[in-house]
Amino acid sequence: MSEIQQPTSEDPTITARPETSLSARPLPSGTAPIKAEYLLYPTSTVESSSNAELNGLDQDDLAEGPTAGGDARDNKRRKPNNNNNKKERRGANKARSFPVIRETNIKICKQWESTGLCEFGENKCKYSHSWNGYFEIKPSDIYLNSSLSNLSSEPPYVDILDIETTTVEENDIIGKKINLRTVCPVLKDLGYCPYGWRCRFLGGHIKKVDSNQAESESTGPVTTIGKWELTNFATGEPENKEERWKHGETNWADYNVIGKLKRNQYDFPFSKAYLSVVEPEKPFTLNTSIPKYNSKQPKHNKRKQNNAPLDEESAMNVSEEAALNNEESALNGDEEDALNGGATAEKGYIAGESEAMEVPLRPEEKKRLNWEGGRYLAPLTTVGNLPFRRLCVDYGATITISEMALAQPLVSGHNDEWALCRRHESEKMFGVQLAGGFANRMVPAAELISKNLHGGVDFVDINMGCPIDLVFNQGAGSALMDAPGRLAKILVGMNRALGDIPLTVKFRTGIANNKPNAHKLIPKFVTQWGAGALTIHGRSRTQRYSRLADWDYIKTCADTLRESLADANLPPVPIFGNGDCFSSQGYYEEMEKSGVDGVMVARGALIKPWIFTEIKERREWDISATERLEGIRKYAEFGLSHWGSDTQGVNTTRRFLCEALSFQCRYVPIGLLERLPGKLNERPPAYKGRNELETLLSSPFVNDWIKISELFLGKVDDAFNFIPKHKSNAYGGEEAQG
Ligand SMILES: Cc1cc2nc3c(=O)[nH]c(=O)nc-3n(C[C@H](O)[C@H](O)[C@H](O)COP(=O)(O)O)c2cc1C
Ligand SMILES: [Zn+2]
Ligand SMILES: [Zn+2]
């Protein structure tokens, strides 16, 4: 029977995956075994050659790059009295792939808004000190219902009450825009809403008052306009200056420190002392006003190859670093030497013991952390943002880590890089991941973290795995695996700069496919350079995601680690394995077989964040579509709390929600599978879910992700156009957008 069966295309709820081949052949390997009753075309198969491509696996490694276009870099919450916002925002918006709903005609002065005062005064400040006219241009409230019971598996999936049906009969301008039945997710989360009148869920914290007051002239923020009074407005500023928590988050960059870093006036006493010993020939400077491009760096051109859109600023930052170090980046001849315990490594090690730098080095001198049995969410650029990590913690993750932060912009005081270090209070064991190729940036970055975020950072991890050219060509990420001389200086220095904060490393098997060298570095990591925990991703740099991680080699590494610790008579150092974990069963099998202390989960968590519940409860969870939608709503709410519930925050939340959905749509409900557990690298033939919502959630089309976002974030502008950073699932996107 080779006749092609056409889908019943009238059914708008069935989102067909693009067809590849429809002949009646046995399922090629790599095809998810979907039960016949859920197949859209009973005879269809997928073209195995295109599996990886269609499943987005070939794109996964590109997604590891530093966030491009400034997207995740603008994930900071705007400070109420930041008067410099204009410039920053303009830059950020330019890079966005979606237009911001216009609310720009009137820009309210943040300082005036939160305190009722502005240090610049009425005439000097560029921003508005009045709400006059604001509500004429403010978009209407978004309706959000936070009760658990209001989700359903059939359209419209949530109870949608639009503004027309719920607006109070008031015909004043505020009355027309608000929805008194909406819930403000920030108020729900924090007990106050710092977005006040700008909040798009304003109806959730406003009440009618009798008097018809004009905008009050009194001191303090305006809390009454016309017949409406703002309730639960607070800026969340900690009363005590020492208190580092605000809005349920910590690791806020200190304004003064950022200023000093920008002006190159920050003192790095430890880094100076250390670098003068290990690199006496290179005076320590953070001055970056030297030529950005250097002809000795032909590798720059290669950046284009990886198609990753570049954030020009961060591209420049790394190239500055390389330019600064260009003598060294002609990869020092002492690397091999160092691996064999040669001069450079020796120098770094011994220097570290001189009295000038008497700070802890050995893991036992560090804060004790409980790694064993930890459910570790991998570092994930762009998608591993704070709201996503919070969701994973909710599902059972116990160890979380920031997106990769680049050392250079960090020590240059770039706010956006500092924002990557932010931690939510639910993250009980939290690390910051740093990338950089040289001690003269990595050690100062560690010193900064230790001095300024101490208490908010449980460990610092070095990225030695990032494969993309932009990072690799600057000597950072996986390039470090072939640079033991630089590694020695970086690790020993960072380790000491960090004081009692443990230093960890995340690395690959090696750079080239058939030349794994991780096992050669491991003894150095733990016996000489003081790494407090290791994670090995079982792939080489050149290996694409379409090939499976090498868990046999991970076992070799775990064994090597144990042997070298035993030989040196040292206490245990935990090692995590990483690669392809997609189920509870897989998690425990890999752990047992390889002898690692835990398995770090990356794409498995992106596709099914509830994997942490499965691991915790040692079961495979046939999660229902409404339960999945519940997770999506949580993510939206966490996003609004973090990025803001004003128009800009809603836009940012939507953009990252769509980014998250570009992974979550790859989940094939396990109830539809012939055999368990599901596999990360298997691609389903076209299928439908057990109900309309399940079908919708499997859609690879951008327009459907937007539709899902609208359930919680309100309608988008007609012009809304989302292009995921990670394009894997945007196939057919053109049609979808047509
Ligand atoms: C979208 C994406 C972003 C990533 N970002 C980072 C990162 O910032 N730092 C890092 O060390 N690894 C990063 N990785 C690699 C993962 O942490 C992990 O090592 C890799 O995906 C293999 O694990 P998995 O098979 O469970 O996905 C990223 C991977 C993906 C897919
Ligand atoms: Zn002002
Ligand atoms: Zn609010």
Image (cartoon, rainbow, N blue to C red):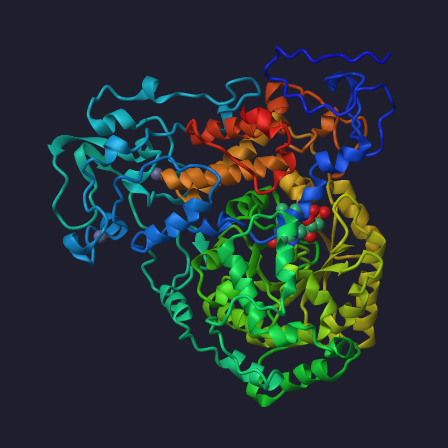
* Residue 222 seen by the camera: yes
Q: Position of residue 675 (x, y in %)?
A: 81, 29
At horizontal 68% and vertical 55% (from top left) the residue drawn is 467
Asked which quadrant contains residue 537, the reply is: bottom right
Q: Position of residue 278 (x, y in %)?
A: 62, 83
Asked which quadrant contains residue 232, the reply is: top left
Relative to 80, residue 653 above or below: above
* Residue 378 seen by the camera: no
Q: Position of residue 369 (x, y in %)?
A: 63, 63
Q: Quadrant of the N terminus?
A: top right
Q: Nearer the viewer, residue 734 or 556?
A: 734
Q: Position of residue 16 (x, y in %)?
A: 67, 21
Relative to 217, residue 666 above or below: above
In the image: residue 323, left or right of residue 141? right
Relative to 358, residue 202 above or below: above
At horizontal 39% and vertical 27% (from top left) the residue drawn is 143
